[in-house]
Amino acid sequence: MRIRFDRLLQQFVVRWYWIQQVLVTGFAAAVAWQLGDTVSKNGGVVAAIVAVLTVRSSLYKSTRDGLGQVVGSSVGAGAALLALHFFGLGIVTVGITVLLSLVAARVLHLGEVAAINVPVTALIVIGPGLSETNAANRLVETLIGAGIAIVLSTIAHPKTPAKRTIDRISSLTDRCAALLAIMGEGLVGSYSLEEAGRWLARARLLAEEIPSVRNQVIEARVFAKWLPASRSANAEKLYVRGIAVEHMIVQTRATSRILYDLRLHGGVKSEISQSIGALLATASYALTVSAEDFRFDPYSIVKDPLTAEIRSGAEALTADALADHEEIATGQIARVMGVVSSTIVIADSLDQISPAIRNVPTPEGPSSKQVLAISPIEQARSWQNRLYRLIPKRIRSYLERG
C-alpha cells in the first residue's frame, strides 16, 4: 500500500509544473467569471474566455496577449456594430464582420495573436441581445479577463523567468553535448549513412528549440526591467548566454550535416575520421562541464580552460587533413575544415568572446509574432504620408512652398 501511494504521489511530483499552470488557469477563469458577472448580467462568460486565452507562460507574453485582446475586442465590436447597422443580423453580417475584422487586424499590424482574437470577439459581440450597451459591457468584460490573467500569470510557473532560462540553457547545452558525444563515438569506428542520417535528424529537432530559448531569454530580460539594477544586469548575462547557445546548436547541426555528406561521398580514411571523433568528444566534454558550471553559477563569465583543448584539437585535425591532401578529395578536405570551423565557433561561444555574439543585435522574433508589431506613431506617420500623396501635385507644391 505504501509503495502504491508513493508511486501515485510521484506522478503528481513529476507533473507539478503542469498542475500548477492548470490550477492557476482555472482560478483565473473562476475569478474572471465572478467579476464579469458582477459588472453585467451573464458577463462572466466573456471574461472567463478571455482569461483562459490570455494566461500564458510569462508576465511578458500575457501583457502582450492582453493588449491584443483589448485592441481586438475594440476593433471586433466596431466591425460587428457597423455590419449589423447596414445589413442586420444574418449570414451576410457574419461574413462581413469576420472579413472586416481580419482586414482591420492586418492594417493595424496586430500580429497573429490579436488577429485571431479580433474575429472571435466580433462574433461574440454579434451574439444574442446585441446593442451598443452590450458591446460596451463585453469590452469591459474583456478588460477584466485580460487584467486578471496578466496578474495571475506571474504565479503560473513554480520558477522565475530567470530560473526557467537557466534550466532551458543548461538543458540545450547538455543535449548538444550528448549529440556531439554520439557522433564522436560513431566516428571512432566506421559509421554508416543511416547513422549519420539519424544524427542529422536529431540535430534538426535540436535546432527547432532555438525559438523557445530565444523567447525565454527575452522574457527574463524584459521581466528584469521591473526589478533592481543587479537583476537586470544578470538578465543581460543570461541573454548573451542564450545567444551563445543558439550558436552552439547551429554549429552542432552543421557538423551533423557535414558528417552525413562525408559518408555520402565515400568518407575519409580512418585516421582522419578518428581525429574528427576525438575533436567532437572534446567539444562534448567541454559543453557538459560548461552546463554543470552554469547551473552552479549562471552569472559568472569565466573563460573555460577546456576550450583551449578544442582549439588544440582543431589545429591538429587541420594539420592531419592538409598533410594528406593528395590522398583526400578536395571536397572532403573542405568538409573536414567545416567540422574544424564549427568546433572553433563552439569554443568561442563557450568563452563568449566572439563579436558575433556581443556586437551583432539579435532580432526578438518576427514582427508577425508581436502584438502591435509597428508602433502607433509609426503607423500614423505612414498613413499621413499616404494621405498626403493623394493631394493633387499642384496643391502639394503650394503647401511645400508655404
Image (cartoon, rainbow, N blue to C red):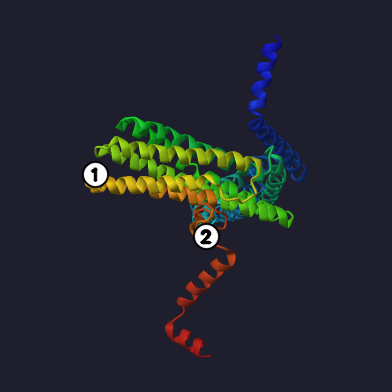
Local crowd size for mark 2, using a 10 Å CA cut-off: few (<14), some (14–19), many (≥20): few
Q: Position of residue 348 (x, y in %)?
A: 49, 52
Q: Earlier in the sequence, mark 2 or mark 1?
A: 1
Residue at 56% x, 39% y: name it: 289
Q: Are marks 2 and 1 in contact (CB under 8 Å)?
A: no
366 and 113: which one is in front? Answer: 366
| Left or right of residue 319: residue 151 | right
| Left or right of residue 80: residue 256 | left
Q: Amino acid at mark 1?
A: Ile
Residue at 41% x, 38% y: name it: 278
| Numbered-mark total | 2
- Whether residue 130 is visible, yes or no, is yes
- Checking the image for residue 338, the label placed there is none
Residue at 62% x, 53% y: name it: 237
Residue hosting label 2: 361
Residue hosting label 1: 328
Q: Residue furthest bottom?
A: 402
Q: Amino acid at mark 2?
A: Pro
Q: Secondary structure at mark 2?
A: loop
Q: Secondary structure at mark 1?
A: loop
Q: CA distance from mark 2 to mark 1?
A: 40 Å
Q: Residue furthest top?
A: 1
- Image vertical order of residue 229 relative to residue 288, above or below: below
Q: Position of residue 115 (x, y in %)?
A: 53, 51
Q: Position of residue 95 (x, y in %)?
A: 48, 48
| Left or right of residue 229: residue 189 | left
